[in-house]
Image (tube, rainbow, N blue to C red):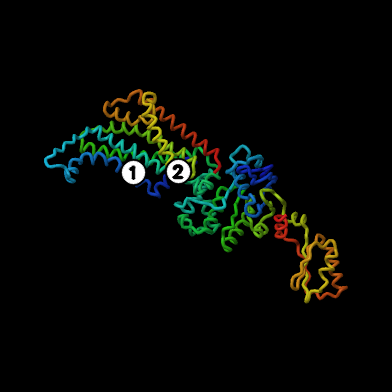
Amino acid sequence: MQWSVIFKKELLENWRNFKWIWVPIVFILFGIMDPITTYYMPKIIDAVGGLPEGAQINIPQPPPEQALLMSINEYSSLGVLMIVLITMGIISGEKKSGVAELILSRPVSFTNYITAKWASSILLILVSFITGMMFSWYYVNLLFGDLSLSQVFGAIFIYGFWLILVVSITMLISTLFKIPGLVGFISVLIVIFIHMLTSIFRHILTYSPANLSSYVSAYLYTGEMTADMWSTIFVTLIGIVLLLTSSIFILRNREI
Amino acid sequence: MALLKVEQLTKSFEGKEVVKDLNFELETGKCVALLGPNGAGKTTTLRMLAGFSRPSRGTIQFDEDTLSKDIRQYIGYLPQFPVFHNWMTGKEFLVYAGQLSHMSKKEAEEHADRLLQRVGLSDAKKKRIGKYSGGMKQRLGIAQAMIHNPTLIMLDEPVSSLDPIGRREVLNLLTELKEEATILFSTHILRDAEEISDEILLLKDGQLIEHGSLDELSQLHHTARLELDFRSVPEDVREVLSHFDFIEHVNVQKNTVILMTAEGDRARKTILKLAAEKDWDLTRFELVRSNLEDLFMKAVNR
């Protein structure tokens, strides 16, 4: 009851500040940018010119799987940055402005407060991500060849967990610090740190959530969901639960 | 019956005690003013009572019936500078606040309409809060503190930031509210406390220096003030009056002599007798009950 009140309020807020319009648009742009520019690259180079007379332009067109992975790559850099930017104020913004005083002077359960806000962000981001991927799939099919819808949904399913983890990290940092800019900065650092750690200790950290993008690639080429991949998803889920629990714990024990 | 009992309440920030060993009880149905100069620890005290900040020491105990439950259900709180979701309308915010306090949507909407009417915001209820003036926000703040019919309403400096008209409206509103709930409000303006409160808690440097009803306090500090107006002040008046040990202080202004005394009756008799004997040309003689302002100044400057 109280949970849905907060959840609905968050949805309404995101609607009134137009997040439900511009976030999906941005995700669509991220999704179609790379496949389209890759396809038209020879023409672009041709039009721009500057190549010596008689030079042969021979850029092989990637298979559809790789074209779709380009979109995933875009989401793992610009997309993640975007997610951090729209999530960083989720708790810190209300604390900083002082609205939190009016809200938390009511018998609001901290669990409801955190999870409802989290769920509304996840909804916005997943809807945007799925929409972006659908657009990407459309162009990949059009320009690079057939790719089945089920494969695209498999990719969305696997990579979605990484995006949810990013939201959860930002959310935890948002309960720790009051300045949204600082929250964004630290969250991005943490994501970069996870990536770095994973590539340095690749042989030990097989189940690191940062590996999800390579599992997406493996899945797209082989069409199989391996045991390692499921384990990684499981580890990611545990991470998400831990982050949420810590957020609730911190909010409960911090002075507002 | 005590609604709230505070014992040894202390709060320190970085080793400095901002609130020191407060002990008091709030009785059901009373309107209590938390009075004190700026920086006396009023906001810190209210924030501890509202549960925003943890006491460094001491206990806050609510009425036994509410012990096991979330006490925030029974409290309506208005911070000194209330901030709302500016993208909401006034009514939306009240309904949201009511629902957070476990009211049904229908219940919250009905109550919100009634409250908006009462605080004079009916016409603005569909306007975004971002467009409200300071006074309107303050009134909306009071409405949100009342939306869930709390037993205790706590208001932090509810009138300090308002212009005289807004101040008057809010004071009238608080007077009405006294019938419905126990009120604890902080202020540094004496007249506001004097006007609407039944009891005052006087804070200075984080310590409770006076506590009691207005009548009790003025009896405790039963200094009376005598004002004498003369056509022309007799030259020896100060000398004559200072002679009596029950007269504490004599102040001669242009045509007026002001006396402070602990024994009003005795001073009256003596002075009237003197006036007859010495043939003083008195034009006015007034025995004024010592008001809160004298008490306030006396307490704060102590």
* Image quarter of residue B226: bottom right
Give the quadrant of the N terminus of chain B: top right
Q: Amino acid at mark 1?
A: Pro
The numbered mark 2 sits on a residue in which chain? A
Q: Residue furthest left?
A: A54
Q: Amino acid at mark 2?
A: Leu
Q: Residues within 10 Å of mark 2 (few under 14, many from 20)?
A: some
Q: Residues within 10 Å of mark 1 (few under 14, many from 20)?
A: many
Q: Position of residue B36 (x, y in %)?
A: 66, 54
Tag 1 secondary structure: helix
First along the sequence among labels 1 and 2: 1
Looking at the image, which residue is at 61% across and 59% down? B171
Q: Position of residue B290 (x, y in %)?
A: 75, 61
- Front residue of this view, candidates B19 and B158: B19
The numbered mark 1 sits on a residue in which chain? A
Looking at the image, which residue is at 75% across and 54% down? B216
- Front residue of this view, candidates B223 and A106: B223
Residue that carries the numbered disc 1 in the rendered image: A24
Q: Is residue B38 shown left or right of residue B238?
A: left
- Front residue of this view, candidates B257 and A109: B257
Q: Which label belongs to residue A182? A: 2
- Front residue of this view, candidates A169 and A184: A184
Q: Is residue B41 shown left or right of residue A111?
A: right
Q: Position of residue B39 (x, y in %)?
A: 62, 52
